[in-house]
Amino acid sequence: MNSPTNTATSAASIQLIQLDELPALRIHNAYADALITLQGAQVLEFTPREQRPIIWLSEQAAFRRSQNIRGGIPICWPWFGDFARNPTAVRAMTASADTPAHGLVRAQPWLLEKITEQPTHTEIVLRYPTAALNAAWPHATELTLTVSIGSALRLQLSTRNTGSTSLSFSQALHTYFSISDIRQIEILGLDNTRYIDTLREWHEFTQHDAVRIDGEIDRIYQQLPEHLQLLDTGWQRTIHLRTRNSASAVVWNPHIEKSKRLNQLSPDAWQRMVCIETANVMDDSVTLASGAAHVLDLEISGEKL
Ligand code: TA6
């Protein structure tokens, strides 16, 4: 009788691996390869078959408990960015003095709830144990992230208000995209969109034509369309961002000078990445009545030109 061999028993292989101090899931299926840390439910890699990596991860990324990881798709919740810049309704949700940038769940352990093999993708559900937030966020809330790994990458960040009073929060899927060169990309779909320029006293401006980047950029676009494109002529590809329930997008690149002040970032890395963050921030922050739910939905796909 033949000895059992290590034959693939499904379309996907999913391994629990260790990245230095952090457990992570490595997914390999017929459509793509991906890597997700349980800390922060942070997608670190997504590479569709026959394509270049879509998501950027710093060559200097550190994988330490309770430390941010530079790159991938950090989850910013229940506030985005500088807490003090958030609307009053969001700031009123906590009395804690500890209000780190980008919220409370980015560098904390999430729980792996479920892995399901679908015909066109692998689906992974992670849940944040919000009861652990206690004083910092004393509100009954269910927070889950569903990641679908197929020819496209889909993230659905669900916030359900299971308490008896309304909740207000801001949020972002802080996606770092891998690009050929910052001088060879354009972001399409934001023409005539209003934006707050955080580098020009947070004043409001209107975008004319495509977004091209020739210096530090840190803008909050509002009242978005549901389809943005990252056109990369250097690599002859377009990355599509299709969203639902996202009214804001943050476009960020640190360029030369700010890069010097950031950790886990080599001096020239700014040339090979750009953030387009799928969000609801500032006036687009979300207020949920008791029992209501909100799903921030992002689908990312690559297309050869
Ligand atoms: O992407 C917008 C932003 O708030 C920038 O201002 C910059 O701080 C960036 O996030 C990076 O944040 P992090 O905390 O990951 O270094």
Image: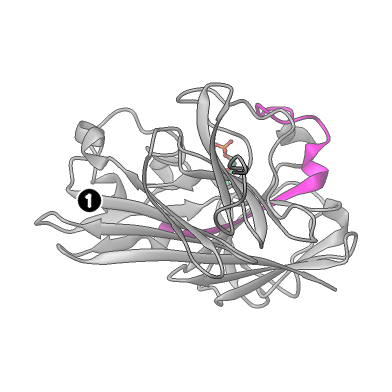
Viewer-nearest residue: 145 or 35: 35
Q: Secondary structure at mark 1?
A: strand
Q: Is residue 280 magenta?
A: yes
State yes or no: Cβ of the residue under disc 1 lies below 8 Å from any atom of ligand 1. Answer: no
Which corner quadrant holds the N terminus? top right
Query: Relative to 84, is 114 above or below?
Result: below
Query: What is the x, y in percent for residue 123?
Result: 47, 59
- Give the residue type at disc 1: Thr
Query: Relative to 7, is 244 above or below?
Result: below
Q: Is residue 265 visible?
A: yes
Residues rendered magenta in the picture:
260-282
Residue in view at x 72 percent, y 74 percent: 208
Residue in view at x 58 percent, y 64 percent: 195
Query: Relative to 75, is 19 above or below?
Result: above
Assess disc 1: are there few (<14), some (14-19) or many (≥20) residues with their C-alpha within 10 Å of its C-alpha: many
Toward which corner of the image does residue 40 lie, by quadrant? top left
Compared across the picture, whether 279 is left or right of 111 comes to: right
Compared across the picture, whether 124 is left or right of 72 comes to: left
